Image (spheres, coloured by chain):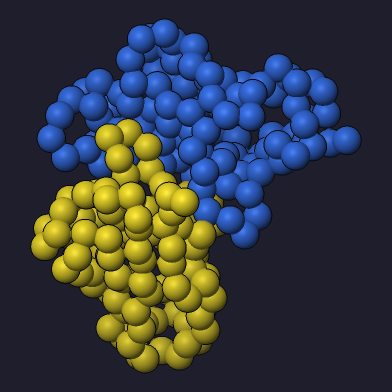
């Protein structure tokens, strides 16, 4: 089954404790991205990747890092999380037109 | 810069009635337009897209959308709403003129279908 997986689905952490949210796709897509969803703001792009070792900032990259060492994986790293990064995060991969989204990771930073 | 506006935070419609969820966009090149749906505690699912061709595009679950270039709109429609259509709907736009093409999402419209 074609899918995008994310882990963990839910995470509660404390300010400053480094964390990584994993993302993997099995569709051999070159393009992947990370979004955060906040009420009233819709989806905002954090980072995207056009291919292995090619990444760039989206609209809200501050406080986040990514890496793309393999085509299928695109982890999101929060080196020092803060409460304003409490949000719902989605990973997505894309073919020529359509984006395929993961199930989401709900992150709470206290 | 490209943008998407979904002017209604929430749309209420009675089951069996037609529904419309509005979307207008701004993009400098050729618009690629999309609708996605999000059910509670789920990721976004693709509904339909406009790339080129017929202005009326049909998608999943009986939904359709009409591309109107002069009004820069891409409203989502369904002839007869179901309670199961209740969800959060997102419109998105991408510049199809070539090169890297970022996707911009609207803020979402919550559709409530009343039994």
Look at the image and give the colour of chain A: yellow
| Residue A79 falls in image quadrant | bottom left
Viewer-closest of B37 and A94: A94
User: Looking at the image, which residue is at 43% across and 26% down?
Assistant: B49
Q: Quadrant of the N terminus of chain B?
A: top left
Work out which residue is located at the far right of the displayed protein and give it.
B115
Q: Quadrant of the C terminus of chain B?
A: top right
**Direction from residue B86 to residue B67 in the image, left or right:** left
| Residue B27 falls in image quadrant | top left
User: Could you tell me residue A76's position as x and y percent?
Assistant: 31, 71
Residue A12 appears in view = yes
User: Looking at the image, which residue is at 54% across and 76% down?
Assistant: A10
User: Could you tell me residue B90's position as x and y percent?
Assistant: 51, 39
| Residue B81 falls in image quadrant | top right
User: Could you tell me residue B6's position as x and y percent?
Assistant: 51, 34
Viewer-closest of A22 and A107: A22
Does residue B60 lie above or below B67 as drawn?
A: below
Viewer-closest of B80 and A43: B80
User: Looking at the image, which residue is at 45% across and 80% down?
Assistant: A83
User: Could you tell me residue B18's position as x and y percent?
Assistant: 73, 19
Provide the letter of the chain coloured blue.
B
Residue B112 appears in view = no
User: Looking at the image, which residue is at 77% across and 31% down?
Assistant: B82
Q: How many marks?
A: 0
Does residue B59 lie above or below B42 as drawn?
A: above
């Amino acid at each position: 089954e074609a899918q995008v997986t994310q882990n963990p689905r839910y995470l509660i952490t404390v300010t400053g404790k480094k964390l990584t949210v994993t993302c993997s796709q099995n569709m051999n897509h070159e393009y992947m991205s990370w979004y955060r969803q906040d009420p009233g703001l819709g989806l905002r792009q954090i980072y995207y990747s056009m291919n292995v070792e090619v990444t760039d900032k989206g609209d809200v990259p501050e406080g986040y890092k990514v890496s793309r060492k393999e085509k299928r994986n695109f982890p999101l790293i929060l080196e020092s999380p803060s409460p304003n990064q409490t949000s719902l995060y989605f990973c997505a991969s894309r073919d020529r037109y359509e984006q395929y989204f993961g199930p989401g990771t709900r992150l709470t930073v206290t | 810069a490209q943008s998407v506006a979904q002017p209604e935070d929430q749309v209420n419609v009675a089951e069996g009635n037609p529904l419309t969820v509005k979307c207008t966009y701004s993009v400098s090149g050729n618009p690629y337009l999309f609708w996605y749906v999000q059910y509670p505690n789920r990721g976004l699912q693709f509904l339909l897209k406009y790339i080129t061709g017929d202005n009326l595009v049909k998608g999943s679950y009986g939904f359709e959308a009409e591309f109107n270039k002069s009004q820069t709109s891409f409203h989502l429609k369904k002839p007869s709403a179901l309670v199961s259509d209740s969800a959060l709907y997102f419109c998105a736009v991408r510049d199809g003129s070539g090169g890297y093409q970022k996707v911009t999402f609207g803020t979402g419209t919550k559709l409530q279908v009343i039994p």
